[in-house]
Image: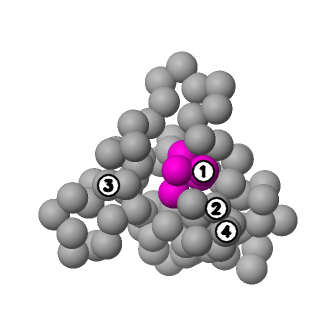
Amino acid sequence: MPLEDVGSETGNNEQLREMVEQSGLTQVEALALINAGQAFPVALSTWKSYLAAPTSARRRNCPDAVLKRAKQTIGRLMK
């Protein structure tokens, strides 16, 4: 599936979750890729809140900047 088609009609959280699942990486491995070289890394608890189920009280909206970084890092593994 092309990267552009990953969750094209869903929100950032769903796109991020699908990318992580399709990459075959663990959540911690995916986070390490996202954070590599970043001045302001994403905390593990924040990362997990982006990947949480839509009905979870823990869930937080994934910012566009995090999704963009995921496409640049995790997305490369999917090509």
The residue where tag 3 is placed is 49
- Which of disc 4 and disc 3 is earlier in sequence? 4
Tell me which corner region of the image, top left, top right, bottom left or bottom right, holds residue 5.
bottom right
The residue where tag 2 is placed is 25
Mark 3 vs mark 4, foreground winner is 4
Asked if residue 46 lies left or right of residue 58, the reply is right
At 70% from the left and 47% from the top, the residue drawn is 73
**Is 78 drawn above or below residue 27 in the view shown?**
below
The residue where tag 4 is placed is 24
The residue where tag 1 is placed is 29
What's the distance in space between the residues labelled 2 and 4, CA to CA? Answer: 4 Å
- Between 51 and 32, the one lying in front of the other is 32
At 58% from the left and 71% from the top, the residue drawn is 21
Mark 1 vs mark 3, foreground winner is 1
What's the distance in space between the residues labelled 3 and 4, CA to CA? Answer: 19 Å
- Between 74 and 5, the one lying in front of the other is 74
Q: Secondary structure at mark 4?
A: loop
